Amino acid sequence: MLIVGLLLSVLLVSVPVVIGLGAAVIPPADTVRYLWAGLTGDTITADEVTRYQIVWQIRTPRVLLAALVGAGLGAVGVAVQSLVRNALADPFVLGVSSGASVGAVAVTVSGGLAFAGVYAVSAGAFVGALVATALVFLASYSRAGLTPLRLVLTGVVMSFGFQSVMAMIIYFSPDSEATSTLLFWSMGGFGAATWGVLPPVAVAVIAGTLLLHHRSRTLDVMTFGDETAASLGVDSTRVRTSLFVLTSLVTGVMVAVSGAIAFVGLVLPHLVRIVVGAPHSRVLVVTPVAGALFMVWVDLLARTVVAPRELPLGVITALVGVPAFIALMRRRGYLFGGR
């Protein structure tokens, strides 16, 4: 597909460019040379050590994490919109991000999961996401199965419940560290990116995206409703349950390392559908690449616009997503349930 090749080409060019930009600007040629040295173990001169560390130890894992999370948010956003048959759904509508935030804040305040070391907060966030997934599933499942409306309503209600728990933890916390942790998890950021967090995120995002693409025809059928799906031999309850578990796990892994980044999984799938059409076999190929490209540049803006301070990613994605969403509604009203 031409558009996929174009987006991949732009992404491959963007990664070294973005790695070289920041408070300390490093020329593209030097950036590529340092990346090559990091990959191959090639030598560098003593006066280049600082710039090499900026490129290889700080910026490269951050940019790669941004690309992975952007791709994952795009793919999961497509699946969730089909899962609940709601064009306003995104990866966080099922309460996973709120549960992760509770886990992260609880670990910060209590000092739990100390065995995980520097990854304790991320581990707490992932555990919180798993607990939220289990609670939403148990509360929304009925004799009729797992219906879209019950999933959405349960996810929204659980989100309010988790937010109340977070508020209580922070209120009784003796220090302000929990507040800053909550701010990070509620608005997102890649400041904690390291090489160590990349493998689990890469496995979750790549495997999740491939599994979703494998079920693209089933997702096409699910968008027409349960009765149509049943007439075509698709067990909606079983499919919806498996998709719910898959999307929640992938979302939980992403939220554990980046916080909740809004609008990416909501707006990008609609933009991609306008360009390539509605079939999920196409949308689930283009959207992850578009999400990766978008998030790489958003992260650059986040760390450079008000440098040396860093903007939360959610601020930028909202500033971009809100007008884009309004424009979509006015231009393509049928995508949102009719004109």
Image (cartoon, rainbow, N blue to C red):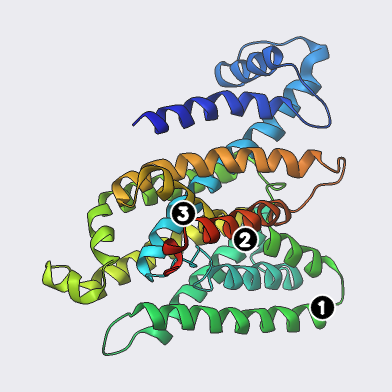
Residue 310 lies, in percent from the top left, at 81, 47
Whichever of labels 3 and 1 marks the residue nearer the N terminus, that label is 1
User: The residue under label 1 is which amino acid type?
Assistant: Ser
In the image: residue 233, left or right of residue 134: left
Residue at 54% of width from left, 60% of height from top? 330
Give how far across and how far down residue 306 sits, in percent: 86, 43
Which of pointers 2 and 3 indicates the residue nearer the eye? 3
User: Image point 42% across, 79% down: which residue?
Assistant: 151
Apparent side of residue 66 relative to residue 148 in the rendered image (left or right): right
Q: Are marks 3 and 1 in contact (CB under 8 Å)?
A: no
Separation (CA) of disc 2 from disc 3: 20 Å
Residue 57, placed above or below residue 43:
below
State whether residue 326 appears in this view.
yes
**Type of the residue with mark 2:** Ala
Residue that label 3 marks: 270
Label 1 SS: loop
Query: In the image, which is nearer the foreground, mark 1 or mark 2?
Result: 2
Which mark, by number, is residue 173?
1
Q: Can residue 137 be seen in this view?
A: no
